[in-house]
Structure formats: structure tokens, C-alpha cells
Image (spheres, helix red, strand yellow):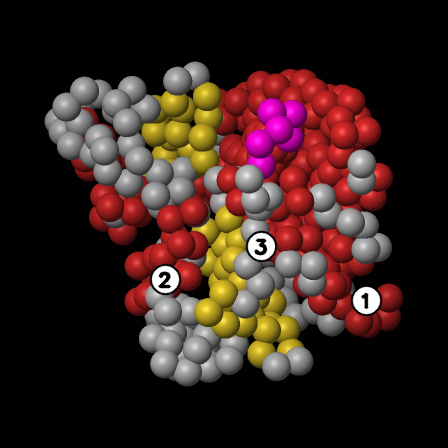
């Protein structure tokens, strides 16, 4: 992750922020990346019962406060009049919403630090979520030993993100691309089900892999798992769409987030009522508390995503400061339907190498009236609507690749 500036979280109270003009888009991107890292670490701390990971989440929460202050200073410095200040309020609102996401990650970390028992249902839910987490040890004869995070062909081909490395008593959070993996390292990784499975098959010894509930048969428990998976996946999808709507200036994506907020509110209430109705059967008070707190965190994430998206819509456009930053990115949003006979039907995003061949980033996919997150092993189907961010000069090539003909 590219850092805006040096930051010592242990000396936050005494730190003076030296101002320098920083593109708003650059600040928003680091806020986005940091909040997503916090969520990954928080969920990992719960799944692997790792207090050190949870502590790192709270440290990153301090960095988020620092980044928000930088954004506030940039907005105040850009204000030349009362009208300017009023127009800049949406950007500050976005920063506040992103800060709420880090708060939600902190709440998840507290589940681990307070030793609130995590019901096995949680681990079962995460084993079925669209994005999975794993924890492996690098063995002596591993192909990974001696390679750089950013230069490992294995990691690149598999398509996983290394979110942390435990090396002896040290924990390296969000390792740089130049960090070298060595024998004995414990890698915390995030990826799709397929990519995680491939990583674990590279000959690595699983160090602390979580397992689901063996032989989960009661219909009620099965339904609870499905509901929790839906809450997690939907909140993360909303976050993807919300960030994209701001960074790409797309009111269309923002409106989709607000639509999903209503859906999320309904599903969150359903989940809590369902869990509380099962309480006697679960016979696990602390486990139920953990479930409720996790569901609340997903709701907080969804609410923050909706606030980000609503900022764009209610402001009826972007402030010139942010608009200028976005224009410099030279990216546009494109929606393309996958027709019958498309050459990419049945292929995964990884197989068609969209990003490397056309410089496109698939933000999300609309399928059968529902949004799904675009992952490397997502298989393209006929009728899918691909929402992509792409440089303007690559639009025609992208459309041709999807449809097999130009427009």
C-alpha cells in the first residue's frame, strides 16, 4: 500500500501534522485501502483467535484518524469562501463515513480482545463467504521461500493478497511488494475459495486454518449460516460499489448502493430475530453475543457505504477539488451486457486476463437482478452485466472482447 506520509501511532497525541497539498483522490484511496486492510485483519483475528492481529487493527484505527485529519486540512486549505466551505462538506462527510468503517473493524477486533466466544456458526459462515482467509507456514522446500511479495509468480498466478506475515515474534502488517518471504514465515492471506485452495496445495503446511461445523444438519443452523454469509458479502459489495462511485464519479453506482442499503437493513433485522429465536437451542450465551456483534459490524459497514454513496447523490455532483482529481485519473465507467455467443462466456476473470489485456477493472457484476462481487475465479455467464472502470481509449477494445464485435 502506498503511504501518504510517515506516521507514528504511538506518539499520536504529540504529533503535529505538517501540511502539504495532497490530491484528495490519493487520500481517499489510502483511506479505502487502510479500512479494507483493517476489516481483513479484524476478521482474521476472530477466525484464528489472534489477539495480536486485533491489536494491529486498533493501531490502524489511529492511522485512519490521522488520514481523516489530513483530508480535513486539505479541504479547509482549498476553501476560499463560505460557498466553497459548503461545497466541500460532502468530502468531509465521505471521510467521516470511512472513519465509521474503521470503527466497525475496531468493534470486530474487540470481540477477540474481550475474549467473547465465537460460535462455530461464524467459522462455518466464513468458510462459505465469497472471500476467504487462511493462515499457512512456509516450509523449508517451499517455492515461496526467498521470493518477494510483489515478485512471486506463484502468488500472482494464484491471485491471493498477503495481508500480514508473522516472523518469529514479529508481525508484519500489510507487507510491501519488496518484502522477502522466508522459511518459517506464517502468511495470513485473503482470496477466493479457489485461490486459497491453490495456495494451500502449493505444499504449504496449514498453520491455523479454521474449520466449519462438522456435519451441520439442523435446518435452523444452516439457515443462520446463510443469513450471516449474506450480511458479510452484501456489506463488502456495498463498500466496493460506494468507493467506486466516488473515485469514478458515478451516480449510477451510488444509487445501487442506496438500493442495497434497504435490502441490508431488512436482512440484518431478519438475522438478529432469527438468532434470538434460536437462543435456547444454541445454548451458548457468549456465542450468541459474538454473532450479534458481528452482524452489527456488517450493518455499520453497510450504513457507512450508503453514507458515502448518498454524499455523491445529494451533492448533485462533485466538488471541483475532487472532480479535478478524478479527471486526472482519466477513467470512465462502462456497463456491458454479455450476449449469447460471447467469447468470454464460461471463462473466469482470471482466465480472460481482463485487467492486463485491456487495462480494465471489473467493479461488479449484475446477475439475475442481483449484484455480485467480481473476483478472479468468477465465471462469466450469458446475460451478465459487467460494470467496469477503464481508460477511455480502451473502451472499444473492451466491448469487442465482451461481445465479439464493436459498437
Q: What residue sits 37% from the left and 35% below the top?
A: 388
Q: Are marks 3 and 1 in contact (CB under 8 Å)?
A: no
The C terminus - image quarter: top left
Secondary structure of the residue carrying tag 3 is: loop
Q: What residue sits 35% from the left and 38% below the top?
A: 378
Give percent across and percent down for residue 403: 18, 27
Q: Which residue in the protein does label 1 denote?
A: 12
Q: Residue 251 magenta-drawn?
A: no
Q: What residue sits 51% from the left and 40% below the top?
A: 128
- In which quarter of the view is residue 89 placed? top right
Q: Which residue in the protein does label 3 denote?
A: 210
Q: Whole-Å distance between the Cαs marked 3 and 2?
A: 16 Å
Say which label, 3 or 2, has the lower sequence index.
2
Q: Which mark is residue 201?
A: 2
Q: What residue sits 61% from the left and 19% below the top?
A: 263
Q: Residue 219 magenta-drawn?
A: yes
Residues in magenta, as a range: 216-221
In this view, the residue in front, 315 or 8, is: 8
Q: Which mark is residue 325?
A: none
Give percent across and percent down for residue 211: 56, 51
Give percent across and percent down for residue 352: 23, 43
25 versus 273 height, above or below: below
Secondary structure of the residue carrying tag 1 is: helix
- Left or right of residue 376, residue 219 in this image: right
- Left or right of residue 87, residue 175 in this image: left
Say which label, 2 or 1, has the lower sequence index.
1
Q: Are marks 3 and 2 in contact (CB under 8 Å)?
A: no
Q: How many marks?
A: 3
Say which label, 3 or 1, has the lower sequence index.
1
Disc 2 packing (10 Å; few <14; some 14–19; many ≥20):
few
Q: Is residue 204 visible?
A: yes
Secondary structure of the residue carrying tag 2 is: loop
Amino acid at each position: 500500500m502506498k503511504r501518504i506520509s510517515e506516521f507514528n501511532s504511538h506518539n499520536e497525541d504529540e504529533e503535529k501534522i505538517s501540511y502539504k497539498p495532497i490530491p484528495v483522490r490519493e487520500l481517499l484511496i489510502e483511506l479505502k485501502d487502510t479500512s479494507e486492510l483493517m476489516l481483513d485483519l479484524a476478521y482474521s483475528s476472530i477466525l484464528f483467535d489472534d489477539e495480536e492481529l486485533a491489536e494491529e487493527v486498533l493501531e490502524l484505527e489511529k492511522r485512519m484518524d490521522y488520514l481523516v485529519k489530513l483530508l480535513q486540512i486539505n479541504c479547509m486549505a482549498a476553501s476560499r469562501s463560505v460557498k466553497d466551505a459548503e461545497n466541500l462538506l460532502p468530502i468531509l462527510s465521505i471521510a467521516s463515513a470511512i472513519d465509521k468503517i474503521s470503527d466497525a473493524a475496531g468493534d470486530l477486533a474487540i470481540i477477540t480482545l474481550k475474549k467473547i466466544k465465537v460460535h462455530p456458526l461464524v467459522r462455518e459462515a466464513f468458510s462459505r463467504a465469497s472471500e476467504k482467509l487462511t493462515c499457512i507456514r512456509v516450509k523449508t522446500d517451499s517455492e515461496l521461500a526467498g521470493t518477494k511479495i510483489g515478485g512471486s509468480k506463484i502468488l500472482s498466478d494464484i491471485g491471493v493478497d498477503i495481508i500480514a506475515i508473522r516472523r518469529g515474534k514479529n508481525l508484519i502488517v500489510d507487507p510491501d511488494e519488496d518484502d522477502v518471504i522466508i522459511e518459517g514465515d506464517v502468511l495470513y492471506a485473503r482470496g477466493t475459495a479457489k485461490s486459497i485452495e491453490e495456495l494451500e496445495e502449493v505444499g504449504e503446511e496449514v498453520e491455523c486454518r479454521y474449520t466449519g461445523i462438522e456435519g451441520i444438519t439442523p435446518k435452523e443452523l444452516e439457515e443462520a449460516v446463510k443469513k450471516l454469509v449474506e450480511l458479510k458479502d452484501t456489506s463488502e459489495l456495498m463498500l466496493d460499489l460506494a468507493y467506486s462511485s466516488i473515485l469514478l464519479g458515478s451516480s449510477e453506482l451510488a444509487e445501487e448502493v442506496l438500493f442495497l442499503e434497504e435490502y441490508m437493513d431488512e436482512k440484518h433485522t431478519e438475522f438478529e430475530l432469527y438468532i434470538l429465536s434460536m437462543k435456547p437451542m444454541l445454548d451458548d450465551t457468549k456465542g450468541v453475543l459474538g454473532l450479534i456483534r458481528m452482524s452489527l459490524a456488517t450493518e455499520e459497514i453497510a450504513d457507512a457505504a450508503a453514507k458515502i454513496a448518498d454524499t455523491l447523490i445529494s451533492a448533485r455532483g462533485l466538488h471541483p477539488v475532487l472532480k479535478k482529481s478524478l479527471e486526472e485519473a482519466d477513467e470512465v465507467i462502462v456497463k456491458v451486457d454479455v450476449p449469447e455467443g460471447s467469447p468470454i462466456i464460461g471463462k473466469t476473470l482470471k482466465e480472460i486476463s481482463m485487467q492486463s489485456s485491456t487495462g480494465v477493472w471489473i467493479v461488479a457484476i449484475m446477475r439475475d437482478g442481483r449484484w455480485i462481487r467480481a473476483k478472479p475465479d468468477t465465471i462469466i455467464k450469458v446475460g451478465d452485466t459487467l460494470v467496469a472502470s477503464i481508460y477511455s481509449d480502451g473502451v472499444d477494445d473492451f466491448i469487442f472482447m465482451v461481445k465479439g464485435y464493436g459498437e
